[in-house]
Amino acid sequence: MPRKALKEKILTVPEVKQILEGLGEENLDQFQRRALDYAAKFSKVEVESAKELVKGLIEKFELEEEEAVQIVNCMPESIEEIRVFLAGGRRIVQTQKLLQVLKFLNQHQKKE
């Protein structure tokens, strides 16, 4: 019997990774294992940084939650890349604001 979703929440890739790791790999089905593998490979920041970034992008830069999550998932490295995530809203964002967003993101980059 399929499970029914109780509520929906937008998650960053690092949050997905944390949730799946918390379930224990032995308890995951093949799709969940693939999702965990993807999340492990493509997490650009640690989970706490991801949460801080999303919150900061929403509060400081007045972005929508969906925009903030996508930006954190991809961690763009230029203002042109940030514009891609904001183009769907068909709004014009000042270059100065985009530079501030980029600086904010750079402060939380995962150290390799």
Image (cartoon, rainbow, N blue to C red):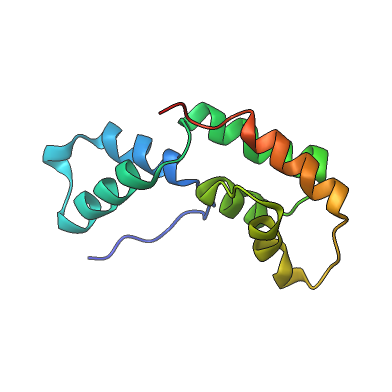
In the picture, which quadrant includes the C terminus? Answer: top left
- Which quarter of the image is occupied by the N terminus? bottom left
Residue at image point 48% right, 34% down: 45
Picture residue at 38% right of the left edge, 61% below the top? 4
Q: Can residue 4 be seen in this view?
A: yes
Q: In this view, does 76 lie above or below 45?
A: below
Q: Quadrant of residue 21?
A: top left
Q: Which of 27 and 73 is in front in this view?
A: 73
Judged left or right of residue 99, residue 110 is left
Q: Which quadrant of the view contains residue 81?
A: bottom right
Q: Which residue is drawn at 70% across and 71% down?
A: 88
User: Which of the pair 8/82 is nearer the observer?
Assistant: 82
Q: Which of 16 and 107 is in front in this view?
A: 107
Image coords of residue 99 (percent x, y): 78, 44
Q: Is residue 62 visible?
A: no
Give the side of residue 11 with respect to residue 38, left or right.
Answer: right
Residue 3 at x, y = what percent? Answer: 31, 60
Is residue 95 shown left or right of residue 82?
right
Does 51 sit above or below residue 35? Answer: above
Q: 38 and 20: which one is in front? A: 38
**Exactly how many numbered labels are in the figure?**
0
Which corner quadrant of the image does residue 19 belong to? top left
In the image, is residue 34 above or below residue 101? below
Residue 50: horizontal and vertical position, in percent? 55, 35
Asked whether, in this view, residue 72 is left or right of residue 36, the answer is: right
Residue at left 84%, top 47%? Answer: 97
Look at the picture and state if 90 lies above or below 31: below
Coordinates of residue 16 in the picture (x, y in percent): 39, 44
